[in-house]
Image: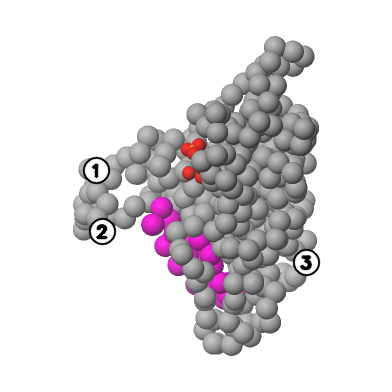
Amino acid sequence: MSHKNQTLGEFIIENQTEFQYSTGELSKLINAIRLAAKVVNHEVNKAGLVDILGTAGDTNIQGENQQKLDVLANEKFIQTLKNREIVCGIASEEEDDYITINSLDENHQNKYVVLIDPLDGSSNIDVNVSVGTIFSIYRRITPVGTPVTLEDFLQPGKNQVAAGYIIYGTSTMLVYTTGHGVNGFTLNPAIGTFYLSHPNMQFPETGKIYSVNEGNYIHFPQGVKDYIKYCQKEEGDRPYTSRYIGSLVSDFHRNMIKGGIYMYPKSSKAQKGKLRLLYECNPMAFLAEQANGKASDGYQRIMEIQPTELHERVPFFCGSKKMVEKAEEFMKS
Ligand code: P6P
């Protein structure tokens, strides 16, 4: 249920009954992410001024210690999530191990775990290219009332209860799903409010954009090479356009609106590819499937993969259903 100019807060309240576990908890979770997104957005937007305000490891004009933005984003999201009484554990690309959050009443009543890539594509900050935050939310599987365990984080993507991203681009957007479609909210920075700008986002069934780092071409499996040549061939609705900006959230967001496929395949240089299963591929796969798209490792559905390690990597093919299926055909032939 959505209507024009609805704020994120109104949308959450109006739709929280859809969240099958209990009212209020989803609101707290998404509100925590909304708050952290605004804080990180403020820092990302002034990143270019860091040298004027003070460099990382230095103090800025306010006398605050400057931090690398991905470390800062990580701290802001963890701190904001910790302050809510519903998260029992957090895993982050920036943390070697997961973080156990002991609820104030010490008997671990909190029910959810959150996995985050706090600032994906952060190397783009220095060249003023869009970056993003990616989050994935599960209900714990070990008993409430006990400390969270690694098992709570190593769940297949199909168990996610919510997932989304914030894209810090020409405008800042929060795009998320709770399993009832994908909705995009744009931040009005003047008043710090997210407004529903992209209700019910859907991948076009096919498209004419392919996103891959072709600098790795000679290292790709033959099936990927053949698919790239298929995209480039003068035939039917091809050649497609190549668009790859080195920021998964941005490439995914553009492809969801216009139609396209994003690929980070395995290669002779990276046997499992580069992207992380738990806090990059699974949340983006949940969004893709909720938006009528598809996400696989070239052979199987990403959200079926049983994780074995917190930071494990998988090959990633994601976007318009027919394009992913065509890529899979080449991978299998
Ligand atoms: P490469 C950013 O580091 C990231 O995780 C994704 O956002 C991006 O699509 C990819 O890696 C870029 O990696 O190897 O092509 O520079």
Identify the residue shown where x is 73% and y is 71%. Answer: 22
Q: Which mark is residue 51?
A: 1
Q: Residue at x 66, y 82 (%)?
A: 144
Task: Say what amino acid the circle numbered 2 marks.
Answer: Asn
Dividing the picture into quarters, in which one does residue 332 lie? top right
Contact, mark 3 vs mark 1 (Cβ under 8 Å): no
Graded by Cα atoms within 10 Å as few (under 14), some (14 to 19) or many (20 or more), the crowding at tag 1 reads few
Q: Gap between marks 1 and 2, in whole Å?
A: 13 Å
Camera-side residue of 104 and 191: 104
Q: Earlier in the sequence, mark 2 or mark 3?
A: 3
Helix, strand, or loop for circle 3? loop
Q: CA distance from mark 3 to mark 1?
A: 47 Å
203, 197: nearer the viewer: 203
Q: Which is nearer the N-term, disc 1 or disc 2?
A: 1
Residue occupying image coordinates x 38% and y 51%:
69
Mark 3 Cα shell of 10 Å, populated few (<14), some (14-19), many (≥20) = few
- Position of 116 with respect to 255 (left or right) is left
Contact? badges 1 and 2 (CB < 8 Å): no
Q: Is residue 267 above or below residue 12?
A: above
Give above or below for 276 relative to 236.
Answer: below
SS category of the residue bearing label 2 = loop
Amino acid identity at mark 3: Gln
Question: Residue tagged by mark 3?
Answer: 20
Query: In the displayed structure, does residue 163 sit left or right of residue 300?
Result: left
For the residue pair 210 and 185, the one nearer the viewer reads as 210
Secondary structure, mark 1, is helix
In the displayed structure image, the side of residue 41 where residue 315 appears, left or right: right
Q: Is residue 258 magenta?
A: no
Q: Which residues are magenta?
A: 70-92
Disc sitting over residue 65 in the figure: 2
